[in-house]
Image (cartoon, helix red, strand yellow):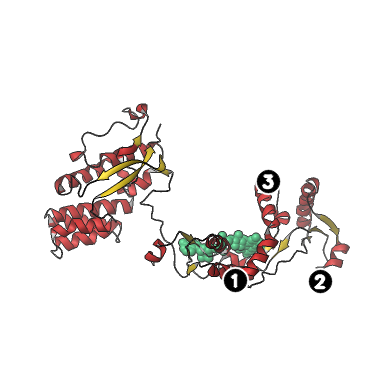
């Protein structure tokens, strides 16, 4: 399933009227789309609805929302026709208007108030006395006091609408994964994002925010603002992550998602086998940034790394302690499994690094890493 999702251009979560309509349009535009639905297609609000297309009958004022719903209604007849042509299902679009009834004293006051503003705004509404309304709909309750008729408010059969949208989307090549709940949005890679918060950075150090391309105002680096690059970071490791966390604490970091800087990465990191430095640097980060321990996936990630480096340096005891902490924070943390395998001798220590890189989606080959220019947004 993960592979199926990774190969798509877009994932839509929720197969109600909104999700299905969005997916259908994306499919028509030639995109590969998967719709993930925790239950069945159109089984929630879109099933319960009454199918009224009634912006006038439901509006309290002529604001932007009202204008949007009125503009949307104006396109509905064409939408219904196109949907029928694409799915073969008639959504029973009806345009004979909507009646709102005043049966009680409260209804009367409410409809009177609506009538006043709609009439003054020159909108398409008619006031009918009880006799005229009963002529139109003879089966109405005879205690009727008066009614408002909205000739421009229409309706569809919402359940047929869902059948039609589902069919049209499938005909446009959309895949539906039903009885599948989306539980988490993974945002480790920030490409396509314009702002990065401290919570996101605590969850994961992001490669896209690379130290070769920081742009920071000089006065923001004052001691009482972000502060300078920490010279006491063990082995200078993680000093860029530290700086980013301090900046993001003040305000989200602005990320310009453009390849403006080229970074050439070698086969291995200078720190590749500096296990002791890696361990003390990560401990230093945990001490300085309570946000990391406060974020379960972030803490699990760091404990998983500490477990791997402890296992790689032959310290089985620490590897098991850190593994336990990683699992406590997130039982799915892949580095924990790697560390256990190494600490118990199932895989050789040399393999730990390769496995850890694979778990992080990094392949240790010579590569050109095109990074993004970004601005540390703190003032
Ligand atoms: C009783 C009632 C009457 C109504 N009458 C009208 C009316 O006459 N006219 C009108 O215009 N509107 C009406 N509405 C409102 C209308 O039904 C909703 O605005 C509309 O259906 C919303 O569509 P949707 O796709 O956003 O939500 P839904 O139809 O609820 O679809 C959302 C889908 O997302 C799925 N989902 C949620 N979380 C996850 C997850 N984590 N992973 C996977 N799937 C997930 C749900 O299972 C659901 O199927 C009515 C609503 C109700 C309840």
Q: From this viewpoint, is residue 158 visible?
A: no
Q: Quadrant of ligand 1?
A: bottom right
* Dot placed on the residue nearer the N-terminal end, 1 or 3: 3
- Asked if the residue at tag 2 contacts the one at tag 1, i.e. Cβ–Cβ closer than 8 Å, the answer is no
Secondary structure at badge 1 equals helix
Q: Is mark 1 within 8 Å of ligand 1?
A: no
Report the residue at 19% width, 61% height from top.
340
Q: Label for residue 139?
A: 2
Q: Point out the frontmost of discs 3 and 2.
A: 3
Left or right of 325 on screen, residue 32: right
Which quadrant of the view contains residue 326?
bottom left
* Disc 1 packing (10 Å; few <14; some 14–19; many ≥20): many
* Disc 2 packing (10 Å; few <14; some 14–19; many ≥20): few
Q: Point out the frontmost of discs 1 and 2.
A: 1
In the rendered image, residue 355, in percent from the top left (x then y), is placed at 22, 59
Q: Label for residue 54?
A: none
Q: From this viewpoint, is residue 184 visible?
A: yes
Left or right of 68 on screen, residue 201: left
Q: Where, quadrant-wise, is the C terminus in this rendering?
A: top left
Q: Point out the frontmost of discs 1 and 3.
A: 1
Residue under label 1, please give it: 163
Secondary structure at badge 2 equals loop
Quote the CA–CA distance across marks 1 and 2. 31 Å
Q: Is mark 2 within 8 Å of ligand 1?
A: no
Residue under label 3, please give it: 63
Quote the CA–CA distance across marks 3 and 2. 35 Å
Closest to the observer, 164 or 344 = 164
In the rendered image, residue 372, in percent from the top left (x then y), is placed at 36, 42
In the rendered image, residue 204, in percent from the top left (x then y), is placed at 32, 49
Q: Where, quadrant-wise, is the N terminus in this rendering?
A: bottom left
- Asked if the residue at tag 3 contacts the one at tag 1, i.e. Cβ–Cβ closer than 8 Å, the answer is no
């Amino acid at each position: 399933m993960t592979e199926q999702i990774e190969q798509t251009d877009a994932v839509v979560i929720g197969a109600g009227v909104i999700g299905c309509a969005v997916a259908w349009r994306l499919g028509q535009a030639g995109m590969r789309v998967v719709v993930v639905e925790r239950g069945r297609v159109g089984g929630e609000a879109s099933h319960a609805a009454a199918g009224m297309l009634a912006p006038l009958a439901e509006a309290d004022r002529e604001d932007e929302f009202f204008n949007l719903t009125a503009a949307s209604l104006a396109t509905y007849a064409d939408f219904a026709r196109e949907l029928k042509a694409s799915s073969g299902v008639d959504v029973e679009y009806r345009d004979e208007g909507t009646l709102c009834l005043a049966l009680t004293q409260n209804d009367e006051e409410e409809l009177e108030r609506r009538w006043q503003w709609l009439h003054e705004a020159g909108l398409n509404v008619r006031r009918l006395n009880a006799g005229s309304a009963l002529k139109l709909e003879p089966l109405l309750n005879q205690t009727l006091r008066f009614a408002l008729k909205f000739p421009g408010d229409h309706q569809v059969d919402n359940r047929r609408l869902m059948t039609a949208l589902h069919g049209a989307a499938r005909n446009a090549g959309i895949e539906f994964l039903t009885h599948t709940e989306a539980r988490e949005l993974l945002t480790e890679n920030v490409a396509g994002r314009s702002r990065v918060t401290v919570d996101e950075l605590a969850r994961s150090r992001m490669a896209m925010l690379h130290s070769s391309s920081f742009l920071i105002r000089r006065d923001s680096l004052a001691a009482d603002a972000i502060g300078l690059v920490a010279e006491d970071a063990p082995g200078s490791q993680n000093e860029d992550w530290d700086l980013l966390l301090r900046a993001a604490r003040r305000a989200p970091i602005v990320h310009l998602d453009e390849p403006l800087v080229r970074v050439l990465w070698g086969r291995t990191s200078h720190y590749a086998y500096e296990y002791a430095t890696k361990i003390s640097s990560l401990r230093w980060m945990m001490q300085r940034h309570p946000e990391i321990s406060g974020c379960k996936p972030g803490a699990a990630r760091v404990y998983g790394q500490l477990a791997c480096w402890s296992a790689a340096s032959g310290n089985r005891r620490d590897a098991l302690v850190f593994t336990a902490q990683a699992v406590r924070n997130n039982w799915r943390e892949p580095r924990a499994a790697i560390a256990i395998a190494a600490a118990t001798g199932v895989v050789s220590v040399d393999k730990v690094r390769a496995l850890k890189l694979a778990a992080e989606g990094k392949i240790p080959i010579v590569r050109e890493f095109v990074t993004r220019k970004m601005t540390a947004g703190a003032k």
